[in-house]
Image: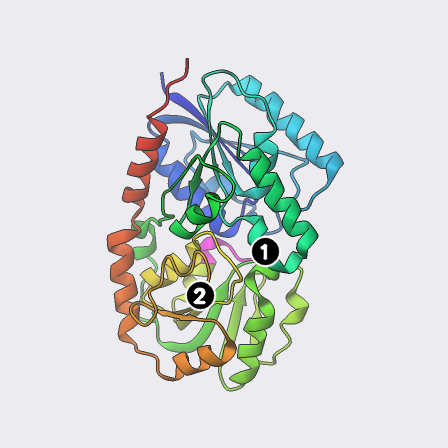
């Protein structure tokens, strides 16, 4: 009989969705898989197309990104009841909200629980000291539960050691076979700087806008949407809104330059994909980004708009090829799957 694995994820869109799609698709022949998910603005309508037909998808109606005591309690009870029905061997929590609610549930003896933060909420220093302490204290208290954290990068692993002793890391990876079909004669032919993701405090649209204002003759595109869209005021910025994954990968093929202005990351899938597509990548020197890019070896790490402008002015086109080769060697889906299978198989249901 196949082991049952339930993945629980509130942040079901963008990079986390791509990561789970690759992970679950690679495990679907050998495990009985269910995903309990929350719906966000960026969650695609054709969600079933991202997963094999034997993977069960169940929407949690009260899953919300922000703290909402009533909905959070309802979501926790809904998850608890579904877990009792499914009776999984392994439960894997993804992102901070699912990590908090999921670790408040009492599990059956023999069930093993894992948690992947995909970027700890307490790393957000712009929320103010009070919220920072709430997120940090919640992780610290729940870190005493018998739950193993699987960080998605070395930097996230080092952050996890502040709140738990039960931790390891498996780098996020991508399915390069899927991406190969998007290469074309138009790839990397246009001088456009683009980014992908939710327009919010984590992605630092203020810095993105400042850079765009400093380069009025360069076109900038933000693929995504979010509650801080109004901060992107430069005349040379285009905001596309949320697109399907296929449309996104097709539209970005022609553009040469990828940028991430994030304040923090887990390990961004959009960056891994840009590197594989031989883009010249410019990323802020923060957790997640610096696990992937080595400055001036396979991309550029910067801290300020001024430093970005210096790096862009002296950019080396060969770094795009170096980035592509790095993904092939270090961030393949096969490597990630092998490490997850080894981790999951260490535990047996009593």
Image quadrant in which you'd find residue 62: top right
Q: Is disc 2 surrounded by few (<14), some (14 to 19) or many (20+) residues within 10 Å?
A: many
288 with respect to 242 (left or right): left
What residue range appears in magenta? 242-247
In the image, residue 231 sits, relative to residue 62, either above or below, namely: below
Q: Circle 2 sits on which residue? A: 285
Q: Is residue 317 left or right of residue 13?
A: left
**Magenta run includes residue 243:** yes
Circle 1 SS class:
loop
- Of residue 298 and residue 320, the one placed in the foreground of this image is 298
Q: Position of residue 51 (x, y in %)?
A: 43, 38
Q: Quadrant of the N terminus?
A: top left
Image point (70%, 31%), residue name = 73
- C-alpha separation, residue under disc 2 versus residue under disc 1: 15 Å
- Determine the residue positioned at 34% across, 79% down: 315
The single residue placed furthest to the top in the displayed view is 350
Q: Quadrant of the C terminus?
A: top left
Q: Is residue 75 magenta?
A: no
Q: Position of residue 311 (x, y in %)?
A: 39, 79
Residue 57 in the image, given as x and y percentages of width and height = 52, 33
Identify the mark nearer the N-term, 2 or 1: 1
Residue bearing mark 1: 124
Q: Which mark is residue 163?
A: none
Residue 344 appears anywhere in the view: yes
The one of 195 and 186 positioned closer to us in this rendering: 195
Q: Residue at x 47, y 48 (%)?
A: 159
In terms of image quadrants, where is residue 239?
A: bottom right
Colour mode?
rainbow
* Quadrant of the rendered image containing residue 225: bottom right
């Amino acid at each position: 009989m196949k082991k049952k694995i339930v993945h629980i994820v509130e942040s079901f869109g963008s990079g986390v969705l791509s990561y789970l799609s690759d992970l679950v698709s690679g495990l679907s022949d050998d495990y009985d898989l269910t995903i309990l998910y929350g719906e966000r603005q960026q969650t695609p309508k054709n969600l079933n197309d991202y997963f094999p037909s034997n993977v069960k998808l169940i929407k949690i109606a009260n899953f919300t990104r922000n703290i909402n005591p009533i909905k959070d309690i309802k979501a926790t009870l809904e998850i608890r009841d579904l877990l009792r029905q499914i009776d999984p061997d392994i439960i894997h929590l993804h992102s901070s909200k699912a990590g908090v609610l999921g670790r408040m549930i009492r599990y059956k003896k023999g069930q093993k629980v894992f948690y992947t933060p995909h970027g700890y909420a307490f790393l957000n220093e712009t929320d103010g000291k009070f919220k920072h302490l709430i997120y940090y204290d919640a992780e610290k208290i729940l870190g005493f539960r018998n739950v193993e954290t699987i960080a998605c990068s070395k930097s996230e692993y080092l952050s996890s050691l502040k709140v738990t002793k039960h931790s390891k890391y498996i780098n996020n990876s991508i399915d390069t076979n899927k991406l190969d079909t998007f290469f074309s004669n138009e790839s990397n032919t246009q001088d456009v700087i683009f980014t992908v993701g939710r327009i919010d405090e984590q992605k630092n649209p203020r810095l993105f806008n400042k850079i765009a204002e400093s380069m009025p003759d360069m076109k900038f595109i933000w693929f995504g949407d979010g509650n801080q869209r109004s901060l992107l005021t430069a005349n040379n910025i285009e905001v596309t809104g949320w697109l399907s994954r296929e449309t996104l990968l097709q539209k970005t093929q022609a553009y040469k330059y990828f940028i991430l202005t994030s304040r923090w990351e887990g390990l961004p899938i959009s960056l891994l994909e840009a590197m594989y597509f031989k883009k010249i990548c410019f990323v802020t020197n923060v957790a997640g980004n610096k696990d992937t890019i080595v400055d001036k070896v396979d991309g550029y790490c910067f801290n300020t708009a001024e430093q970005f402008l210096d790096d862009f002015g002296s950019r080396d086109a060969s770094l795009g090829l170096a980035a592509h080769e790095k993904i092939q060697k270090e961030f393949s889906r096969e490597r990630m799957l092998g490490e997850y299978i080894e981790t999951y198989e260490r535990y047996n249901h009593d």
